Image (cartoon, rainbow, N blue to C red):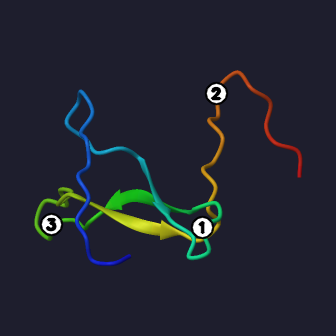
Amino acid sequence: MDGRVLPILLGPTGHPPKWYEIPVPAPDGGLPTVLLYERVPAGYSKRLGLQKGWKYAFTPTGRKPKPRWPWTKPPKP
């Protein structure tokens, strides 16, 4: 990242999105590389254990997990 701050749109509940994708242009003009970041808790307070907020952690695999619905079969190993 080059140090720019990108705006993050909040959802109807006031939370930032669970996944954030940042397209990085290729130096040769090809397809851009997409960096994927996941929303994780920023920390917890000492006394009550309340969540302090959110931060984004880099996901090196570059793929979002597929949604799991309660009525779907478990994945085969």
Image location of residue 28, percent across then percent down? 62, 74
Residue at numbered disc 1: 29
Tell me what residue is drawn at x 88 percent, y 45 percent: 76
Residue 9, image x, y percentages: 25, 41
SS for tag 3? Answer: loop
Nearest the camera: 28 or 44?
A: 28
Task: Report the mark closest to the observer, 3 or 2.
Answer: 2
Per the image, the residue denoted by label 2 is 69
Q: Position of residue 66 (x, y in %)?
A: 66, 41
Query: Up-down: is 36 above or below 26?
Result: above
Q: Residue 42 appears in which quarter of the rendering?
A: bottom left
- As drawn, which residue projects farthest toward the left? 47
Quick one: 47 or 41, which is closer to the camera?
A: 41
Type of amino acid at the residue the image marks with label 3: Ser
Check disc 3: other Cα within 10 Å, few if <14, some if 14-19, many if 20+.
few
Q: Pointers 1 and 2 in contact (CB under 8 A)?
A: no
Residue indicated by mark 3: 45
Q: Nearer the viewer, mark 1 or mark 3?
A: 1
Specify the amino acid type for callout 2: Trp
How far apart are the alpha carbons under marks 1 and 3? 46 Å
Sequence-first disc among 1 and 3? 1
| Circle 1: element type | loop
Alpha-carbon span between mark 1 and mark 2: 39 Å
Residue 1 lies left or right of residue 54; in this view the side is right
Specify which label sits upstream in the sequence, 1 or 2.
1
Left or right of 38 on screen, residue 6: left
Question: Which residue lies most toward the right here?
Answer: 77
- State the residue at coordinates (47%, 69%): 58
Q: Look at the picture and state if 12 lies above or below 41.
A: above
Amino acid type of the residue tagged 1 in the rendering? Gly
Q: Position of residue 67 (x, y in %)?
A: 62, 36
